[in-house]
Amino acid sequence: MGRKELSKRDIWQDISGGKAGIAEKNFYQVFLNHFEGSDFRIRAKPKEFNNIYFGVNLSKAVLDEIYTPNVEKWRHGVLPDYAIDNTKTKKTLYVEVKRQDGWVEGKPRSAGRGNAHERSCKFFTPGLLRILREHGKLGDNVLPFWIVFQGDITRDPCRVREITCWYDKYSAHFFMWRNSTDVKALLSHFNNELKHLLT
């Protein structure tokens, strides 16, 4: 990829990042209002996992083969967008809000080129599932996270099929917030599909 193409990519990432920030803020405000006066709360950027990778034990053989920086400690972890806590039961559901473009009317198929949905799959990995389940106290048969998708990805014929396949019987753990002004649909999904996990 040449300099011209890279400069266009930077601009695209800036625009996409800005839109993602707005999407996250809207989500946070909805739940901040919804939980007022209840046993539930929403926390932005929960810090409990912000250094989980640093403490991963590696064998001496592996350590001998990788770069070991000359510093005592560095931050290396996962920072979910939100945590929804039940302050009474001490149970937590971790949340990611992913806004992404997609292939919809009037756009070429390449408009669905983003990978935010793929990056959210890190929560499916055995190690992160174990860690999130321990902290969230939701049990071993429950996904301890919820992904909320916004933007054209929610109508992209390829991405919607991919996500539906990935989640399979855990379809309650993703939500296509197709109309971000429809607060009722978002809250209805949480209240009907996920809230009981926290009680």
Image (cartoon, grey):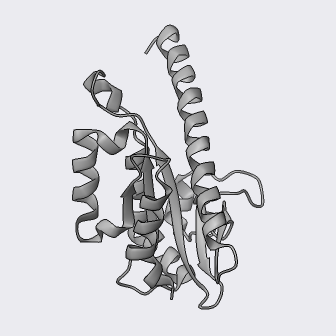
Residue 113 appearing in the image: yes
Rendering coords of residue 133 (x, y %): 48, 80
Foreground residue, 2 or 35?
A: 35
Rendering coords of residue 146 (x, y %): 45, 65
Q: Residue at x 29, y 31 (%)?
A: 103
Q: Is residue 20 above or below residue 138?
A: above
Residue 79 appearing in the image: no
Foreground residue, 84 or 128?
A: 84
Q: Residue at x 34, y 83 (%)?
A: 141
Q: Relative to residue 35, is residue 128 drawn left or right?
A: left
How many marks can you see?
A: 0
Foreground residue, 111 or 22?
A: 22
Q: Residue at x 51, y 89 (%)?
A: 199
Which quadrant does the N terminus fall into? top left
Q: Quadrant of residue 142?
A: bottom left
Foreground residue, 36 or 84?
A: 36
Q: Quadrant of residue 174?
A: bottom left
Rendering coords of residue 157 (x, y %): 22, 40
Q: Relative to residue 188, is residue 134 drawn left or right?
A: right
Residue most toward the right? 72
Q: Is residue 128 above or below residue 91?
A: above
Q: Residue at x 28, y 43 (%)?
A: 159
Rendering coords of residue 46 (x, y %): 66, 65
